[in-house]
Image (cartoon, rainbow, N blue to C red):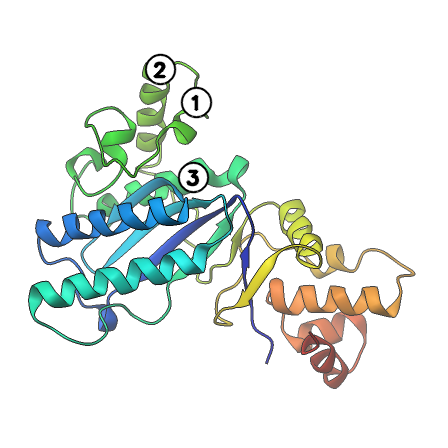
Amino acid sequence: MARALRIKYPGAVYHITSRGNKKEPIFYNPKDRLAFFSTIKSVIKLHNWICHAYCLMDNHYHLLIETPDGNLSDGMRDLNSNYTQVFNKTHSTVGYLLQGRFHSFIIEKETYLLEVARYLVLNPVRAQIVQHPKDWEWSSYNATCGLSHGESFLTTDGILAMFSIDKAKAQQQYKQFILDGLYGDSIFKSVKHKGILGSPQFIHEMWKQSQKTFLVEAIPKEERIIGRLSLEDIFSEEGVTREARDKKIRMARILCGYSVAEIARFLKLSQALVSKISRKD
């Protein structure tokens, strides 16, 4: 069965989550959290990442990462394996700390970076752990709005620059932006599956480029797309060659997550043919 793709390219931005095995805690105390900070600091330096935001909960963490070198998987392998080693040594345990593979979706930076950053730092509030994001010291909120010096691996300039070139003004606007989200719905509230967060144009452009220069790898099929193109949009062009049609079928199936039955019904093709096309390299 066709599976979704983990898209990698220089400059890609991702929201990343990784959860404890069997939903168990991955941070028991502040010492564990500081050990994670030390680990991710090394990973960010080694892999030339940019960390725009983060939030450490008890049994999972959130990161907002930009990868100038298009090396998400390499860095995540180092981060999770190295932190697991540190955790197991500290607590005299063995085995898997984290639950399977990390989850990620790629973000259209210009449109959704701020929304995702807000989602991250509001996690402790939505989980009813604290009443205000400033009360949770294990997120990037305080550093971004100037209430603390922050961790050295965090880069706040990218987010603040989207508000104002004046840093003090940008920090105030950032605070208000975060607070404006306290009583609104999360952008992910109605979304169960993750894959891409972007406009239809962004998604379509990524698919076109993936045929040329993107590096991709398979990820679990349950990871899908937010804001995906409709089948009407994907197949809107008439008179295309069979090769072009087949590429569009693979786009609909693999990247956008449509079922074989949905595509076959739309194109008036047999499910067997659509399934065969979807499996082609």
Which kind of residue does numbered mark 3 sit on?
A: Glu
Could you say which is closer to the camera, residue 241 or residue 132?
241
Picture mark count: 3
Position of residue 277 measured from the top left corner of the image (x, y, whole percent) = 74, 77
Tell me how far mark 3 sits from mark 2, CA to CA: 19 Å
Tell me how far mark 1 sits from mark 2, CA to CA: 8 Å
Tell me how far mark 1 sits from mark 3, CA to CA: 13 Å
Position of residue 168 measured from the top left corner of the image (x, y, whole percent) = 32, 15
> Mark 1 near mark 3, Cβ–Cβ under 8 Å?
no
Of the two numbered discs 3 and 2 on the same chain, state the one appearing first in sequence: 3
| Residue drawn at x 63%, y 46% as measured from the top left | 202
* Secondary element at image label 3: helix
Could you say which is closer to the camera, residue 190 or residue 44?
44
Of all residues shown, which one is farthest toward the bottom? 272
Which kind of residue does numbered mark 1 sit on?
A: Phe
> Mark 1 near mark 2, Cβ–Cβ under 8 Å?
yes
* Secondary element at image label 2: helix
Of the two numbered discs 1 and 3 on the same chain, state the one appearing first in sequence: 3
| Residue drawn at x 56%, y 46% as measured from the top left | 198
Which residue matches tag 3? 115
In this rendering, would 184 be left or right of 208? left
Mark 1, mark 3: which one is toward the viewer?
1
Q: Residue 183: which numbered mark, if any?
A: none
Of all residues shown, which one is farthest toward the front? 46
Which residue matches tag 2? 169
Residue 179 is at least partly visible in this image: yes
Position of residue 116 measured from the top left corner of the image (x, y, whole percent) = 41, 43
In this rendering, would 193 be left or right of 44? right
